[in-house]
Image: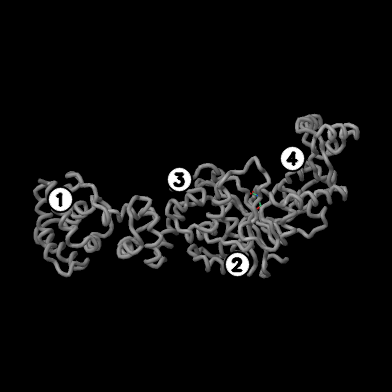
Amino acid sequence: MPFPTAAPVRVRFAPSPTGSLHIGTARTALFDWLLARQTGGQFILRIEDTDRSRYVPGSLEELMAGLRWLGLEWDEGPDIGGPYGPYLQSERLPIYHEHAQRLLDSGHAYESFYTSEEIEAMTKSVGQGDAAEVNRLMRVMPADEARRRREAGVKPAILFKVPLDGETVARDEIRGEIRTPNRTLRDPVLVKSDGFPTYHLAAMVDDQLMRITHVLRGQEWLPSLPFHMLIIRAFGWEPPLFIHPSIFLDPSGKGKMSKRRGSTTDQPTFVRDFRAGGYLPEAVVNWAALMGWGEEGGDREVYTIPELVQAFKLERVRPSPTAVNYEKLDWLNGVHIRMLAPDELARRLVPFMHRAGVAVCRDDLLPLVPLIQQRLTTLDEAPDLLDFFFVPPPPPTIEEMIPKKMTAEDTRAALAASRGLLATLEPFTAEPIEAALRGLAEARGWKAGDLFSILRVALSSKRVAPPLFGAIEHLGHATTLERIDQALALLG
Ligand code: GLU
């Protein structure tokens, strides 16, 4: 399979159900998905759930929901099946055992009855970290001792035999050739004594059987690449191409992006945080794609998903780590919000209004969209801007209502005069409302800004609200006059 590729790829996203979907992990899935869609290939979801101790209930559902929310639909996977299933590794145990047996039979693997304490003691006795020496010791156990342990019910682990000398040449398509002296490689476990395979065996077997052409996976797997090449070659297989995109750094660029933080909306970490924080999946995809990839010579930053499918180039994936940039995310989110059709934006705002306790439907929101579409950064800002259209706001305080250089008397006069004007204004739409209020301010010698601020607070109890004249239009005659009357009553 050539690199770069135009031929249809088969790529897999192979998460372990051990927690929430991290944005860095999702970015790898995105690269897979882009490559599959671009080449007319397949994107496969495989769940690596053989480490029972790390299983987190509910995480598989969250993973799938996160991928779907981002729009990364898979072509084969545990829920939809496919020609190379099952796609849950825990349902493939006989396949791994059969393959482990093949390596035992061909002399590439051995059974080990040693305990981890015994292996640790061997390591200490060798010193200097010479892995080949430890490997030599681990591979032998007197036959009668092995028999005794087996008869006592001890289950052996199966380990791979790394060559004791020479070097292993592996290749990462964006990083180049990696040569590793075999002396430095400890025999890896293929099957643990509990009968479950390790990643080293299960992933290599599955990538082969599932006909994977390109393996994209986290940079943390790079040190294991020599093992994987050795295992693949021991089976006599042609290896897939390996690509290890960079890790994400925290915003300062100094440390690795935290795995644990999250559940915050100011520094979202997991896909669910982005969703809860009011980011659009289009924006998250756009932003994540730019972390570790970019077009040649381009500083282009805004892409729709179909544009990314066109523009993405695997060979432009960067090996160097990228610091997450939340300002850019906010900016891109605003850009994508403005790209939405108004009724689509209204639809997406509904859950955020509900979450804030404002029971509205899309059609209620649609007329208000023009007031806020230009100014939203995240969807979760909408309730604060829109709630007063639907529920009477708590009354403002007198201090909030009176502008700095005005008296209570002036403020009351301004409200009363506005009320008089608005009561008879026809048509009751933004432009005539603005003209009337500006005229009033001028005639009375008030600053227009002061008058508008008095009205804004009277109508919404907020200092920051959507554009005033549009807001008055949407509140309508009756509500506008009612709220002005309430404010007048407050001022006494
Ligand atoms: N299950 C591995 C992980 O979650 C997958 C790595 C891979 O994509 O091969 O890290």
Q: Which residue is mark 4?
A: 194
Q: Earlier in the sequence, mark 2 or mark 1?
A: 2
Task: Give the foreground label among 3 and 1.
Answer: 1
Q: Earlier in the sequence, mark 4 or mark 1?
A: 4
How far, Cα to Cα, is label 3 from label 1? 38 Å
Q: Which residue is mark 3?
A: 264
Q: Earlier in the sequence, mark 2 or mark 3?
A: 2
Identify the image quadrant of residue 79: bottom right
Query: Residue 177, position in %: x, y?
Result: 73, 55
Ligand 1 within 8 Å, label 1 CB: no
**Helix, strand or loop under label 3:** loop
Disc 2 vs disc 1: Cβ atoms closer than 8 Å? no
- The quarter of the image holding the N terminus is bottom right
User: In the image, what residue type sits under mark 1?
Assistant: Gln
Asked whether, in this view, residue 216 is left or right of residue 343, the answer is right
Q: Earlier in the sequence, mark 3 or mark 1?
A: 3
Asked whether, in this view, residue 132 is left or right of residue 459, the answer is right
User: In the image, what residue type sits under mark 2?
Assistant: Arg
How far, Cα to Cα, is label 2 from label 3? 32 Å
Q: Nearer the viewer, residue 279 or 127?
A: 279
Q: Which residue is mark 2?
A: 37
How far, Cα to Cα, is label 4 from label 3? 38 Å
User: In the image, what residue type sits under mark 3?
Assistant: Thr
Numbered tag placed on residue 486 in the rendering: 1
How far, Cα to Cα, is label 2 from label 4? 39 Å
Identity of the residue drawn at 13% across and 49% down: 406
Q: Nearer the viewer, residue 383 or 311?
A: 383
**Helix, strand or loop under label 1:** helix
How far, Cα to Cα, is label 2 from label 1? 59 Å
Query: Residue 283, position in %: x, y?
Result: 47, 59
Task: Give the foreground label among 2 and 1.
Answer: 1
Query: Residue 113, position in %: x, y?
Result: 82, 36
